[in-house]
Amino acid sequence: MTIQQLHYAITISEAGSFNKAAEVLYISQPSLTSSMQELEKELGITIFYRSGRGVSLTQDGSEFLLYARQVYNQYEALTEKYGGTANVRKKFGVSTQHYSFAVKAFVELVKHFDMSQYEFAIRETKTRDVISDVSNMRSEIGILFLSDFNRAAVTKLLRSNNLEFHHIIKCRAYVYIWSGHPLAKNESISFDELKDYPCLSFEQGESGSFYFAEEILSTGEYPRIIKANDRATMLNLMIGLNGYTLCSGIICEELNGDDYLAVPFQADSVDENSEMEIGYITKKNTVLSNIGKQYIEEIMKYLKEKAKELY
């Protein structure tokens, strides 16, 4: 088993077919097939189901790819740090809850690199998928938040997936609305004032739960609620329906536009405010690549600058 074979297997799983993977790897399809057959024979397992529509991972293949990604990512980190001679395009991926600041930091990171030498990926996705992507080494880093409500459940899930959470910043809840909202000029907004407007929430899928909600205070009583699955739709609903969502207050006007604002949430004895702890997750006992370290530096710099404006 070679590092090259691990790279081939990972690329095939991502491409979904041997033909597409061969194009990405700049090798012939018969050579790629032969290499995978040799690997499967050596391991004594079948990694891929093959069909006319492409390939999919077997159960053994899924388990093998989990370890293969860990080994290959660490190999890339070593060659990056110690000047390896392998002629491979370095990869860097981030999975995140729907945070514009995570995208902004990613944009600033990519500007520092020759994109012809790297494969970059950023995935705004469901909370469970953020955890799964980092666990499976599809992404090196995941961005999410913890609160008093979800901390125990999310920490348990992180632990079972051999992941660890790293603190970046703590912040309070804000109400995120568009500038033309009837409550836009308020100095603060309470739940009672929001009762006539729809609460917008990112959909977490069939297996979603309160613990995976991306919005702080997700256990509140919301008489009107609409689910969305992307940030652009969420922003459109804010304008079209005077909808609102609850967030950290740290938003990026460059990406979301300046038609939106964050107003402090007004807590009371019934609806107490809660603190969000934003951080990043990584695989335990792994070393961040230089690109990963630079991304964390970018996101910490941006968050701390924004926090000064808010708090």
Image: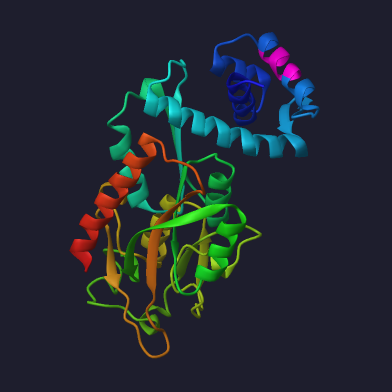
Find residue 183 and report its image quarter: bottom left
- The quarter of the picture where the C terminus appears is bottom left
> Residue drawn 61% across and 62% down?
208
Return the x and y of residue 24 as percentages of the image width and height.
Answer: 54, 18
> Residue drawn 58% across and 52% down?
162
Find residue 59 and report its image quarter: top right
**Residue located farthest toward the bottom when viewing the structure as drawn:** 269
The magenta region covers: 32-38
For the residue pair 298 and 285, the one nearer the viewer reads as 285
For the residue pair 249 and 37, the one nearer the viewer reads as 37
For the residue pair 93 and 166, the one nearer the viewer reads as 166
Return the x and y of residue 109 as percentages of the image width and height.
Answer: 31, 37
Determine if the magenta segment contains residue 181.
Answer: no
**Residue located farthest toward the left when viewing the structure as drawn:** 309
Determine if the magenta segment contains residue 33.
Answer: yes
Numbered circles on residues, count: 0
Return the x and y of residue 112 as percentages of the image width and height.
Answer: 27, 31
- The quarter of the picture where the N terminus appears is top right
